[in-house]
Structures are given as structure tokens and as C-alpha cells.
Image (cartoon, rainbow, N blue to C red):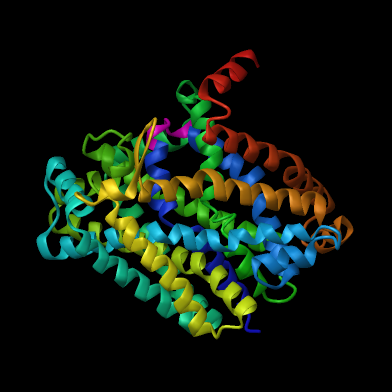
């Protein structure tokens, strides 16, 4: 079996973790939830939840040495064969790709329109352009969805060494260089940069609400690509004698560092032009291009570099989202790699066509469901299902499985050589108690079983 090099694994795992959530989602939710205090809670939960479950997933992959289903089956006690069903997470990434590929297509479209037509010069124009793409240009979305899929499948055809590792060895350093270049450019706007640092890292506690704490916990978990089977599958190809804890730490540092850099540089541009940080999901696709347009030629270059970094982040994550199902098809149906890749790619590509059509005028009513809270398109429902149900359940199952079900002596023997005894005990407490409780709390809150009023009451009484 071909294995990653040590650096190749770290970059591949970081590439899986570093996605649109770091550069697109993290800045806008930080803006919505008040900045520094939110970031502090996010960083704390990265350590006590994200890192703990990441190590657990890497342990399952490295010891199970197969696809998600077989890895759980191999590590579970003989009398508990039902744990193999926890391997459902191997298909979660494929489910996510049905809309993730479309979002990458939006990024490609932004790069194309910037090159051909230039940047929008006002917010109404930017909003109208984005709304037109979403609701009246299904063919344009289909073209870019196809381009994104073709790139992902090409990399997967090449396999672990020639495809996934090689792509990440090129794109991840390039992504970091682009973001650092943009960060240094943002520093030239001294007043805006100073305000950005204050907003991101000075904790204004009055802005910290129970809701923002729940959001920080959720994003700290999701941003590391945990519960999608990607890290598990990559860990199967870990180089022998790899220090799992150290590798996980490098992944966490890269992932978190890129999110923080993205946040700082984006807010530096916003503050420099008198914009407010709470811009919501439209921050990247609507607000930033208008700001960049005010910088002339340099603004166009900046916009292209930014969207290129966003595209790289999306592609490295996309490859990792599809790979677990590829391995499953190879192991369980004895498919060749090419046939497995085509099968997995065809599934998400075809469903993705219906997903993008669900936002199109004249068609959306046929691909939407009316709820009490309003109409949800197929796009909305798939995104909601992964965020609220599949990923929290997968993370919770992994924490319970590694914390209680696997052979604890073997676990201790395997990881104590990677950590000091004290660090192992802290990690073990975290994966057994802290992570499951936090994930269960977040899961119940997102499902509405624990409401915001319940959270407010809990905090007011404690």
C-alpha cells in the first residue's frame, strides 16, 4: 500500500481541514458574533474538542487500516459488531460534495467574471450579480460544477502519492503564500489593520452571548474536517512510526492559523473602507469585491489572489471528502480505483445538478419543502442535515468509541509514546467527557431540543 510521506500527510490532512469554512465562513461568523471573545472561545474549544476528536479519528484510521466501516469493525469488541455502522461517516463527505462543488463553482465564476468584466463597484450590483447566478443561471452553475468535479476526479484518479499528496504539496504552500502576501498588503492599511487586530483578538466580553458560545463550539469542530471520514482514510496511509499527536497538532496549527490570517486580512480591508464586520455569508462574494474595486489594478490583483486561495482551499477539501467513499467502493465491491472514483463522482455530480436547480426560478418550488420556519430548498436541506445531524453524530460516536469501546490498554500503549503521561491523561479526559458533552449539547441545541431560552436560563443561573 502506498503511503504518504510525513510532510505529505500533514499537508493532505491540513488540506482536508482547511476549506471554505476557514476563509469564507470563519470571518463572517466572527463578524456576526462580536470578534475577540468569540475567537477566544473558538480557540479554547479547538484545543479541548477539535484536537481531542481529531486524534481519536486518526487513531481509528491508523489502527483500523481500512475504510470507515471496516476500521470500526476491526477495532470494536467481537460482541459489538454494530459499531461498523458508525462507518456511515465515510459517505458524509459525498453528501457534502453535492453542494460544496457548487460553491467552488461560484468561486471559479468570480475569478472568470473578474478577469473578463472586472469587479462590481457597488453593493447593489454585487448582490444582483450573485442573485442572478443563483436564481437565473443554472447552466452557468452547471458548467462550473462540472469543471470543479473534473478537477477533483482527475486528482483522485492519480491516487495517494501522485494525486492527493502531490496536489497538496503544491496547493497548500501556495495557499499559505497567497494569504501571507494578502496579509502583508493589508498591513499597509495601518489604521484598518490595527482595528482588525483589536476586533479579532481583544475580547469584548459584553458581546459574548450563549448563542455565540454554541456557534464557536460548532465551528471549532467542523473546521477541522472531523466526522467526514476524510482524516480517518488519510490516517490509513500514515507513514509507519508517525507520532499521531504531533501530526494532529500540526494540522490544528495550520488550520487555525489560516482561519485567523483570513479573518485579520478581511477585516483589515473592511475597516479601512468604513464597512462593518457583521456582513453575513455575502461578505466574500458581495462586500469584498466592491472594496477591492476601489483599489484599482491592485484591487483586481488582490481579488484574483483571494479567490484563487479560496478555490485552492475548496479543492483540497473536496478531494478529501470524496476519497472515503472511493476506498469503500474499492474494498467492498472490489472496484478498480478508476471505477470507484467514477462511481463516487457520478453520485455527487448528478445529485448536485438537482441541488443547483433547487435555487432556480421556476424550478425551486419542485425541489423545496415548506417548513414552519419557511421554505427550504434541496441546497438548504442538505447543508442543514450535514451540519446539524451527520457531523455531530459522527464526532460524538468517535469520541465514545475511542474513549470507551476500543481496548483502552492498547490505546494507552499506542498514544503514550506520542504524548507524555500527563498529556495523555488530559487528552483521555477530554475525549471521554468534555468532547462528548459539548458535542451532545451542540447537537441538541441545533435540533432545537435545547432552545436559546434554555441556554440563557442556564447561564443566568450559573
Image coordinates of residue 96 in percent, x first then y, are: 46, 57
Q: How many marks?
A: 0
Residue 148 point in image, percent of width and height: 34, 69
The image quadrant of residue 449 is top right
Q: Which residue is located at x 18 percent, y 44 percent?
A: 127
* Picture quadrant of residue 123: top left
Please identify the residue farthest to the front as the structure is shown. Answer: 366
Residue in view at x 32 percent, y 35 percent: 277
Give the residue at x 41% y 62%. Answer: 313
> Does residue 208 show up magenta in the picture?
no
Q: Residue at x 48, y 72 (%)?
A: 344
Q: Farthest residue in the top direction?
A: 461
Whether the magenta-drawn stretch holds residue 34 is answered as: yes
User: Would residue 294 be found to the left or right of residue 62 on screen?
Assistant: left
User: Is residue 204 something that shows in the picture?
Assistant: yes
In which quadrant of the rendered image does the C terminus lie?
top right
Magenta segment boundaries in residue numbering: 31-37
| Residue 5 coordinates in the image, percent (x, y) | 61, 78
Taking the view exactly as shown, the residue that stands out farthest to the right is: 409
Q: In this rendering, is residue 223 above or below 313?
A: above
Residue 81 sits above or below residue 385 on the image: below
Q: Could you tell me if residue 162 is visible in this image? A: no
Q: Which one is in front, 409 or 299?
A: 409
Quarter the N terminus occupies: bottom right
Q: Position of residue 445 (x, y in %)?
A: 55, 32
For this view, does 55 lie left or right of residue 138? right
Left/right of residue 301 with respect to residue 235 in the rendered view: left
Amino acid at each position: 500500500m502506498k503511503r504518504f510521506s510525513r510532510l505529505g500527510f500533514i499537508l493532505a490532512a491540513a488540506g482536508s481541514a482547511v476549506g471554505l469554512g476557514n476563509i469564507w465562513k470563519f470571518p463572517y461568523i466572527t463578524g456576526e458574533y462580536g470578534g475577540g471573545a468569540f475567537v477566544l472561545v473558538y480557540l479554547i474549544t479547538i484545543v479541548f474538542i477539535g484536537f481531542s476528536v481529531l486524534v481519536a479519528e486518526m487513531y481509528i484510521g491508523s489502527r483500523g487500516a481500512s475504510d470507515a466501516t471496516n476500521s470500526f469493525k476491526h477495532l470494536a469488541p467481537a460482541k459489538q459488531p454494530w459499531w461498523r455502522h458508525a462507518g456511515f461517516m465515510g459517505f458524509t463527505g459525498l453528501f457534502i460534495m453535492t453542494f460544496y462543488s457548487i460553491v467552488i463553482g461560484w468561486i471559479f465564476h468570480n475569478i472568470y467574471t473578474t478577469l473578463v468584466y472586472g469587479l462590481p463597484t457597488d453593493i447593489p450590483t454585487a448582490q444582483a450579480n450573485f442573485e442572478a447566478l443563483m436564481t437565473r443561471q443554472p447552466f452557468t452553475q452547471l458548467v462550473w460544477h462540472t469543471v470543479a468535479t473534473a478537477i477533483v476526479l482527475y486528482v483522485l484518479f492519480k491516487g495517494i502519492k501522485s494525486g492527493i499528496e502531490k496536489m497538496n504539496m503544491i496547493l497548500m504552500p501556495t495557499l499559505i503564500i497567497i494569504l501571507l502576501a494578502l496579509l502583508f498588503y493589508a498591513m499597509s492599511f495601518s489604521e484598518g489593520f490595527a482595528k482588525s487586530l483589536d476586533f479579532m483578538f481583544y475580547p469584548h466580553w459584553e458581546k459574548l452571548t450563549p448563542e455565540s458560545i454554541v456557534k464557536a463550539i460548532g465551528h471549532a469542530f467542523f473546521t477541522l474536517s472531523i466526522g467526514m471520514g476524510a482524516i480517518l482514510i488519510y490516517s490509513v496511509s500514515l507513514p509507519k512510526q508517525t507520532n499521531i499527536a504531533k501530526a494532529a497538532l500540526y494540522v490544528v496549527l495550520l488550520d487555525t492559523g489560516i482561519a485567523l490570517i483570513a479573518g485579520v486580512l478581511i477585516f483589515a480591508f473592511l475597516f479601512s473602507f468604513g464597512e462593518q464586520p457583521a456582513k453575513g455569508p455575502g461578505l466574500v462574494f458581495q462586500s469584498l469585491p466592491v472594496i477591492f474595486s476601489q483599489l484599482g489594478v491592485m484591487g483586481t490583483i488582490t481579488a484574483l489572489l483571494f479567490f484563487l486561495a479560496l478555490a485552492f482551499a475548496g479543492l483540497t477539501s473536496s478531494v478529501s471528502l470524496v476519497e472515503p467513499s472511493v476506498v469503500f467502493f474499492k474494498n467492498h465491491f472490489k472496484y478498480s480505483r478508476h471505477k470507484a472514483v467514477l462511481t463516487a463522482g457520478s453520485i455527487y455530480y448528478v445529485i448536485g445538478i438537482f441541488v443547483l436547480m433547487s435555487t432556480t426560478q421556476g424550478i425551486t418550488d419542485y425541489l423545496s419543502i415548506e417548513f414552519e420556519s419557511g421554505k427550504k430548498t434541496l441546497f438548504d436541506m442538505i447543508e442543514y442535515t450535514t451540519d446539524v445531524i451527520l457531523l455531530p453524530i459522527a464526532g460524538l460516536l468517535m469520541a465514545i468509541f475511542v474513549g470507551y469501546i476500543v481496548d483502552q490498554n492498547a490505546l494507552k500503549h499506542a498514544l503514550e509514546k506520542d504524548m507524555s503521561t500527563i498529556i495523555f491523561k488530559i487528552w483521555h479526559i477530554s475525549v471521554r467527557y468534555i468532547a462528548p458533552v459539548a458535542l451532545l449539547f451542540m447537537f441538541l441545541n441545533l435540533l432545537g431540543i435545547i432552545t436559546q431560552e434554555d441556554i440563557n436560563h442556564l447561564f443566568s443561573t450559573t
